Amino acid sequence: MQMKKLDLHHKRHSDVERLTENFVFGNDLPLEIVTGNSEKMRNLVQNVLDSYKFKYYSKWHTNFGSTVVIDYLDIEY
């Protein structure tokens, strides 16, 4: 089965947090988020993933502008 993909090309930086949250919480893992070559876009996505304790990696060996979300750490505070 192919993983679902969120393509953030041509999306506004101001919309990235909401789009990323809706995508990762509305779908089963693993997921792919395409940010393109924008370092700012990659950082925005990674900040969201970090804030919710998601595990992820960059597909640097095949596509540096793509992040794969693989796990969620359900931590109670």
Image (cartoon, helix red, strand yellow):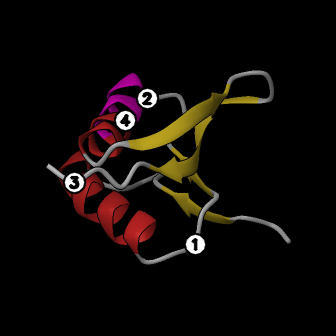
Please state which amino acid type lies under the numbered disc 1. Asp
**Between marks 1 and 3, how big is the CA–CA gap?**
21 Å
Q: Is residue 35 above or below residue 8?
A: above
Estimate the spatial distance between the alpha carbons at disc 3 and disc 2, rounded to whole Å.
33 Å
Most prominent secondary structure in the magenta stretch?
A: helix
Q: Position of residue 3 (x, y in %)?
A: 72, 64
Nearer to us of marks 1 and 3 is 3
* Residue named by callout 4: 46
Q: Callout 2, which amino acid?
A: Ser
Q: Residue at x 36, y 55 (%)?
A: 74
Q: Which tag, 3 or 2, sits closer to the chain's start?
A: 2
Secondary structure at badge 1 equals loop
Q: Residues within 10 Å of mark 3 (few under 14, many from 20)?
A: few
Mark 4 secondary-structure assignment: helix
Start-end of magenta stretch: 39-44
Foreground tag (3 vs 4): 3
Q: Amino acid at mark 4?
A: Gln
Check disc 4: other Cα within 10 Å, few if <14, some if 14-19, many if 20+.
many
Q: Which residue is mark 1?
A: 28
In the picture, measured across the screen, residue 12 lies left or right of residue 26, that is: left
What's the CA distance linking mark 4 and mark 1?
A: 18 Å
The location of residue 19, given as percent across then percent down, is 33, 64
Q: Which residue is mark 3?
A: 76
For the residues carrying marks 4 and 1, which lies nearer the camera in this image? Answer: 1
On whether residue 45 falls in the magenta region, the answer is no
Q: Residue at left 34%, top 71%?
A: 22
Mark 4 vs mark 1: which is more N-terminal? Answer: 1
